[in-house]
Amino acid sequence: MATEGSSTALPGTVVWLHSLTTTRLNGQTALIAADAVARDTAAPGRCKVELLAGGDVISVRQSNISLSSPHFCIKEAPDKDGVGVYATQDIAAGTRILSEPPLLTLPISATKASFETLIAALPSTKRAALFQLHDCSSQPATAEGIFATNSFGLGTPGTEAGIFLTTCRLNHSCLPNCSHFWHGHLGARTIHASRDVACGEELTLSYISHHIMEWSDRQAELEEVYNFTCACEACRLSGPARELSDKRRTAIDSLVDSMNSAFKASRYVEALQLVEARLRLLEEEGLASPSMLYTAEFDAYQARTLAQRHAEARVWLERAHMHVVMANGADSERARRWPECWLCPANDVWKLPEPEKRRHRRIV
């Protein structure tokens, strides 16, 4: 990899770098992190870095780092301590924003010794990229703390986790505008827009697996696991507005329990009414994302099927299929398996094990 123009660069000089590797700049070796590829209208797919005086080390100014993508860039977040991911164009709901393989994976049962061996075996550029990530548990950052803070579950919950350099740059919101999903057959985690996103808007995920909780419970979990206080749109509510939000979220949870009881008692009309009430509350609370909708719509499909109202059931299944494609992609296992519903109408073919959300993982 080489710089454009002069082969000698002084501190303060802006240079453009191609690809991801080490490079010699002004007689010194600079490690360019694996997520430090910039998207720039004048120079797409190249990395703009400003060389800083730093003794024997040339560092990269974080605010100049962004990720190459037609949909987003990574840059300093003005209202947060660190970086965020921002849309560089209008993004329609259901758009696949990213498909990212893991930097590294690790069994949940891995020991500290095996983890250290894995880190030591990483190429220098990947190791440098790993250590640019945040550690919410200790300073200076440790590899174990970084993995615990940034890892996502893979496949069956509680078995394996991985680090995704770009995905973990998305900040948390209790009203996320993106969803993420692990595609085992692709070996990648995908990010899809949960709603229409405007150019310049920050892209967000929920860090907690059950974000339909009251404000106090969400704050407690985020503080315990990630050591921060959420100030998203939902958490900035106060007074009667917060009380109403908490009431809706509690009701959504309660409706799921009531629906399950109705199913067990073969009260299918009641089950459908509870699903419809849940859909209304999701819309009112701003949580009507494709991933939330298809689950409820599939429940409605089952209720209508078991009540022998097949024409109505088909409408609900088509809605659910549309939203599962928007949430996970047409190449996801759920989307590919949807015709099986007609072969076995009561089969929970979409209720596959959900890969865990981003969780705090401790290396033992």
Image: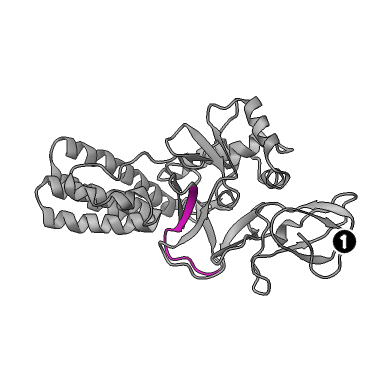
Residue at 64% across, 73% down: 41
Whether residue 294 sits left or right of residue 222 in the image: it is: left
Residue 353 location, quadrant: top left
Tag 1: amino acid? Pro
Seen in the picture, residue 41 relative to 136 is either above or below; the reply is: below
Specify start and end residues of the magenta stretch as a single range.
188-199
Q: Residue furthest left?
A: 308
Can residue 284 be found in the magenta stretch? Answer: no
Instruction: Depth check: give the residue in front, 360 or 244.
Output: 360
Taking the image as shown, residue 313 lies to the left or right of residue 138, namely: left
Residue 192 belongs to the span the image colors magenta: yes
The answer to which of 364 and 198 lies nearer the viewer is: 364
* Residue 121 place in picture, x, y as percent: 68, 36
Numbered disc 1: secondary structure = loop
Whether residue 285 appears in this view of the structure is no
Query: Quick one: quadrant of the C terminus?
Result: top right
> What x and y, as percent, mark residue 205?
50, 51
| Camera-side residue of 99 and 273 | 99
Task: Name the residue: 68% across, 74% down.
Answer: 42
Can see residue 190?
A: yes
Examine the image and state in which quarter residue 130 appears: top right
